[in-house]
Structures are given as C-alpha cells and as structure tokens.
Amino acid sequence: MKGYRAIYFTKNTGFQLVLFSFLLLCLVSCRPSNENPSPPWEDFVIFREGNFPLIIVAPHGGDLKPQWIEDRDCANSVITQDQYTLGIALQLEEKLKTLGIEPFMVLTKIHRIKVDLNRSLTTSHCEDDTSNELWRLFHRQIEDYSSQVANEFGQGLLIDLHGHGHSVQRIELGYLLSGQQLRDFSQSGNPAQSIQTSIDGLLANHPRNQPLDSLIFGAESLGTLLSNNGFPATPSQQDPAPLEGQPFFSGGSNTKNYGSSEGGQIDAIQIEMNREGLRQTSQDRERFTQAFAEILAQYMRYHYADVTSSL
Ligand SMILES: [Zn+2]
C-alpha cells in the first residue's frame, strides 16, 4: 500500500509539474492579443467635484499630442490651442478656493489638433475616431456634474473658457446672441420675440426678476463687472455689442448643449478671453484670475442668491 501510494504520488506530482509549466508558458505567451489596449484617457483630463453651483470647462487649452491619434487635417479644421486657458482655469480654481468656493472642474490636457471638445462627436475629429472614447468621457462628466448641481442646488452656471485671436482686446461673452442680435437688442431695449439665450433658466428664476437686458447689459451683468475691474468685455454697459463687421464669438457647442436655451436649470456663458493684458504674461494671468474669481463670486451671490446664500 505504501509503495502504491508512493508511485501514485510521484505520478500526480509529475502531472502537476506539467500543468504548472503549461500555465507558466501561458502567462508568457498565451495572453490574449493586446495590441490595441484602451489608452489611459484619464491622463488627458482633469475632473474635480465642487461644493458650489459653478462648473468650469476648458476644452482647448491642452498641449498633449499623442502620436497614435491622427491630426485633424480636414478642411476648415481650427487646430490652434487656446493658449494659457488650461492654466487660467486651474489658477481660477485656486483663487476661488481662497474665497471658500470649490467649483466643479472639467478640463482636458489634449491639444485641439487631436480632438475638438467643443464640437459634436462626429465633427470633433476628421477620419480617426480613436478619440471618441475621450470625447464621451469628457462630455459624460459635464452631464454628470450638471445633473449633480441641478439636484443638489436647484440651479447653476457653467462657464466655458476659451481664448480668441481677434484684434480688439476685450473679453467676448457668448450667450448665444450674435453680434447683430446684440446690436438690435441694445439699441431697441427689447429682445426679438424668438430670442433664445444660454441663460434663459436664470431669466425665468431670477431672485430679483431682472429682465434680459439687465442680465446682458446691466450694472450687475458679467460683462459690466469685468469691464469695471479693468478687463473690457462685450456685451456690457460700457460696450453693449461688437460693431458691424467685427468678428465675435457668440457661443459654441458646449454653450448650446449645456446652457438653458432649451430649458433646464444650468445656464452657460462662453468666456472668450483676449490676449493682451489678460493671457499674455504671468502677471496678467495672476491679476486676471484674482479679479475674475472675485467677480464670479459676486455674480453668483447676486444672480443665484436663492441657491448660494446659504453656501
Ligand atoms: Zn476655444
């Protein structure tokens, strides 16, 4: 019996050794094909949850150009980076924190030559759809934070940060109103009947029932507050509308999709920052982000008083 057991044990051990060797070999060579692993998209984004109904988005400030995503080279593709806007968003967050405000942050570090995150999925790239997963990750996060802000606070504001290259050195605020609409509106004092803006939710729920012209051109409008603090902006009390023929950004896909022009509790304003005296030097950026943080705090506490007074 003893001998039989010894033989059996030896046979069994031999089988185990073969099995072990096979498994070891598999570890080295039988792994499933992994030639196209999912890229680490988290490395290309910065998402941070906040404690205040303000969401800051910056889609064009990144400088990462991974070789494995083709450049956007189709006709009319705008591929320039909005210089310093990623850094400005982060500095703004820091300044806001010193005021007790933690905004929700949705930023990307990827360069616009690879994917444009202020466009629809199908137009965010040319032929190469490798970046679709990044596009979905970025926009799902904006949607999640927007829902969270709406649920927790009831109302909120999203600002979409950009940098423009227009020759007139002023901030252009996009409420989805074109230069012509702003000229007509500021001259007549009455908006055209069909007018839709990205702050229609604010208009409907304003704690002081301010009319739309006050929200766009009034003493407490964002453009007027910026201009008062040494950062000229249009539309504002000081500069109600761009002149005929002057280029102006009225708001892109993020402002349309995440603002309240079609309803909802989250408003959006596109902030197109000029270069001279604002983005150009580190001193400019320091001065601007400090002032803008204070202006945003004042703006939110005044216009969103119902939901910010207890924060
Ligand atoms: Zn931009």
Image (cartoon, rainbow, N blue to C red):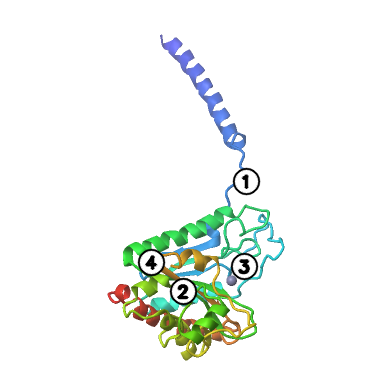
Secondary element under disc 3, as helix, strand or loop, is loop
Identified by mark 1, the residue type is Asn
Q: CA distance from mark 1 to mark 4?
A: 41 Å
Q: Earlier in the sequence, mark 4 or mark 2?
A: 2
Whole-number angstrom distance, CA of label 2 to CA of label 1 = 53 Å
In this view, the residue farthest toward the left is 310
Q: How many numbered tags mark residues here?
A: 4
Q: Earlier in the sequence, mark 2 or mark 3?
A: 3
Q: Position of residue 129 (x, y in %)?
A: 63, 52
Confirm if mark 2 falls within 8 A of ligand 1: no
What numbered label is drawn on residue 193? 2
Q: Earlier in the sequence, mark 1 or mark 4?
A: 1
Measured in 3D between alpha carbons, the distance from the residue under mark 2 to the one under mark 3, in whole angstroms, is: 42 Å
Which circle, 4 or 2, is nearer the viewer? 2
Which image quadrant: the C terminus? bottom left
Q: Residue 265's mark?
A: 4
Asked whether mark 1 lies closer than 8 Å to ligand 1, one says no
Q: Quadrant of the N terminus?
A: top left
Report the disc number at residue 36: 1
Indicate the position of residue 56 as horizontal and vertical percent values: 46, 70
Name the residue rendered at 65%, 84% in the picture: 167
Would you say the residues marked 3 and 4 are in contact, meaning their CB atoms lie under 8 Å apart? no
2 vs 3, front mark: 2
Mark 3, residue position: 63
Q: Residue 166 vs residue 53: left or right? A: right
The amino acid type found where label 4 is placed reads Gln
